Amino acid sequence: MNWLELWRRPDLSLQAWQVFKRNLLVFKKIWVTNITFNFLEPLMYLGAMGYGLGMYVTDIQGMPYLNFIAPGLIASSAMWAAASECSYDSFVRMKFQHTYHAIIATPINIEEVVLGDILFGVFKSVLYGSVILLVIAVLGLVPSFYALLIPLVLVLCGFVFAELGLIWVGFVPNIDSLSYFFTLLVTPMFLFAGVFYPLEGMPLFIQRLAWFTPLYHLVVLIRSLSFGQVSWNLLFNVLWLVIFILIFLFPPLNLMRQRLIK
């Protein structure tokens, strides 16, 4: 494989929105079932760890444990939504439903199909994260109006994990191999990127490793906006995520094109 070929500029047009609209039409038929489980899981974490474990944990960074983990669950919920949509769901559309093959029989090319999937992953990231944001706001856990900017952060989250998911799909031989994506990449970030506790108490090498993960920067941004702890330093977190998105935008498009050609 010519690795430089992965960053070749693909042939794209606004046709990618047609793929997004197609996925949205399908989602409208199954959204109740689809959103319920993704909605309940972070709320169970909030209840079990925030209320349950929180009774035995002292304040963290000057706030109750429940308030501390609530913004992290917004980020993690958005991460799981985009990662699942653009790994398992995309693989099923490509391999079993042959949706990709049907679409590229039209004037839409494969790169636009993949970009449409990425955009839909972004949509689900914003939707799922915003629902959790709304719930914890109703519970009185979001004291700052800066939280209105959180959906913009969720857009970055969606791009990051949609791209990573589709890169994985571009490499793996079968659907079972997708579990490695979650075991080796998504779950470790969920546990070690600052969602449930500050990283200052962890060994230095874990702190440094966590800093390089996108979820760490997303958690910092969402937690800071939730509590109105806004400073110019947050622009560095935004810049880190934007650079990550730009670097990994073309590889999934080119990888999937190469895979379907084979």
Image (cartoon, rainbow, N blue to C red):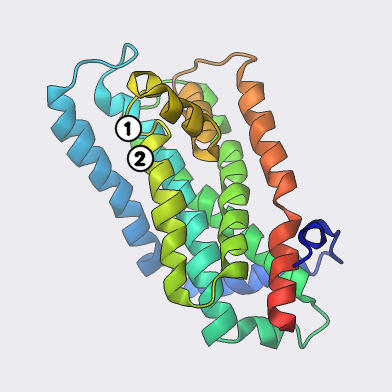
Indicate the secondary structure of the residue bearing disc 1. Answer: loop
**Quadrant of the drawing holding the N terminus:** bottom right
**Residue 258: % across, % down:** 74, 74
Looking at the image, residue 175 sits to the left or right of residue 253; the answer is left
* Amino acid tagged 1: Phe
Residue at 26% in and 39% down: 46
**Quadrant of the drawing holding the C terminus:** bottom right
Instruction: Give the Cα separation between the discs numbered 2 and 1.
Output: 7 Å
Looking at the image, residue 262 sits to the left or right of residue 25; the answer is right
- Observer-side mark, 2 or 1, equals 2
Looking at the image, residue 132 sits to the left or right of residue 47; the answer is right
* Mark sitting on residue 191: 2
Task: Report the front residue among 193 and 106.
Answer: 193
Task: Report the front residue among 67 and 207.
Answer: 207
Considering only vertical position in the picture, is 242 above or below 21? above
Considering only vertical position in the picture, is 257 above or below 59? below
* Mark sitting on residue 133: none
* Amino acid tagged 2: Leu
Q: Residues within 10 Å of mark 1 (few under 14, many from 20)?
A: many
**Residue 213: % across, % down:** 53, 38
- Which image quadrant for residue 245? top right
- Which image quadrant for residue 71? top left
Instruction: Say if mark 2 contacts mark 1, CB within 8 Å.
Output: yes
**Residue 225: % across, % down:** 51, 24
Residue at 62% in and 61% down: 167
